[in-house]
Amino acid sequence: MAKKIQSIRGMNDLLPSESALWQYLEQTVANVLGRYGYQEIRFPIVEQTELFKRSIGEVTDIVEKEMYTFADRNDESITLRPEGTACCVRACLQHGLLDNQQVQRLWYAGPMFRYEKPQKGRLRQFHQIGVESFGMASADIDAEMIILTARLWQQLGVSDALTLELNSIGSLEARAAYKEALVAYLSARVDQLDEDSVKRLGTNPLRILDSKSASTQALLNDAPSLTDYLDEQSKQDFAELTGLLDAAGISYRINPRLVRGLDYYNKTVFEWVTDKLGAQGTVCAGGRYDGLVEQLGGKPVPGIGFAMGVERLCLLSEATDNIPTSITAGPDVYVVVAGDKAKLAAVALAEQLRSELPNLKLITHCGGGSFKSQFKKADKSGAAIALVLGDDEAEQGLVNIKWLRAEKEQQTLAQSAVSALLSSELAAELS
């Protein structure tokens, strides 16, 4: 027997028992975003490596350690996308969507790739839903992005498990001045830093602010504060943002050490975090990136966006017991058949019912077998009702109705009357 081939570590299959929850989450997100005027965009999984080096930053962990990068047959360096914002900007520039400062509200969904140690909630192939808007510089679009995520959490029933953290990291100039002061403070205390923070001190010192080391965090208590270095415009924008969130009734916590890990962010950054998933507590995160479009070759266009992890949303829905029973339910109806004439009648009846009742979930038995074995399969499927046809019923235009989940007498109806009966009996399921 040939050896079985396994999936690549950290790149998981999605089984039928899991896909219903994914579909529910994706459809709910698409519905909420559509109500706010966001349109879907799709772009390739593979991009030129230069795109991510120029956008994310060459000294970030993603570019240095985590990207799946390789040379193609033309010896060009290409990369499996590690995130979606740079891809979205590239697509907008390539197709003229940002010409003349056009306002765009866009969203996308799909797999991203990072070479990390696989663990629960952190995979090498993971899935994100990303949202980006362009052409709006004022804080009202920052507020809209956060408000629509709050509405999404309400729809999914996970609001109580999530906390919004906010910060402003200011302009590039303000951040450069702060970075200089932070480096000077930490360099004098380098022997007190954890190993990762020592490495970041010379490459990406702002990432030290979200170090997981308790000793480093204690050291940061007396470090210069980013808030003290903010430019006036950033302060005004952040005050406007918090005012808009207050008006909308959105609770938040200002976290002065929240910086995000990508070089392109400026001004507003935010995260939705939970304590229900252990170490992988960030479910959704994003911020403003007003310089990214110009950085990738376009004219200056302000932008802001966020991404949410689908795997983590699924885990959160499970941890908070917020999975609607309707999405995991079996079929409404299972058709049991015996005889050649019955097979023909069953196919015709099944298609008639699917046409007349668009939300009906109906399985027609295939593969033969006795009535007894078919009823076992019908019961195992979770169906509420079995429609039973033999050759005699087929010739007479009849069908037997058997309730599988309720104490009701079996009855026989004309095939033409089945649709009305199912519509009445399964009203809740078909709505």
Image: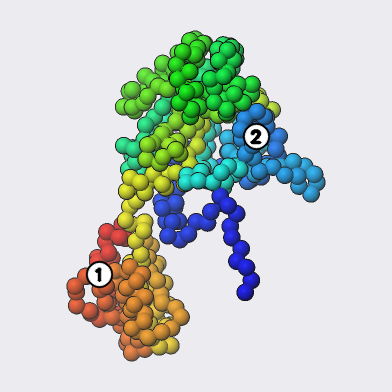
- Can you see residue 269? no
Mark 1, Cα crowd under 10 Å, few <14 / some 14-19 / many 20+, is few
Q: Residue at the right extreme?
A: 74
On the image, the x and y values in percent for residue 351 come to 42, 72
**Residue 278 placement: quadrant:** top left
Closest to the observer, 110 or 364 = 110
Q: Measure the alpha-carbon separation of dots 1 and 2.
A: 56 Å
Mark 2, Cα crowd under 10 Å, few <14 / some 14-19 / many 20+, is many
**Left or right of 218 in this view: 394:** left
Which residue sits at x=45%, y=26%? 214
On the image, the x and y values in percent for residue 72 come to 76, 47
Which residue sits at x=19%, y=77%? 409
Query: Which mark is drawn over residue 405?
Result: 1
Which residue sits at x=53%, y=20%? 192
Q: Amino acid at mark 1?
A: Arg
Which residue sits at x=41%, y=75%? 364
Closest to the observer, 420 or 127 = 127
**Left or right of 180 in this view: 332:** left
- Give above or below for 182 relative to 294: above
Discs 1/2, front = 2
- Can you see residue 274? yes
Q: Amino acid at mark 2?
A: Val
Query: Which mark is drawn over residue 63?
Result: 2
Closest to the observer, 104 or 168 = 168
Which of the two labelled residues, at mark 1 and mark 2, occupies the earlier sequence position? 2
Question: Tag 1, which secondary structure?
Answer: loop
Image quadrant where one finds the N terminus: bottom right
On the image, the x and y values in percent for residue 290 come to 57, 23
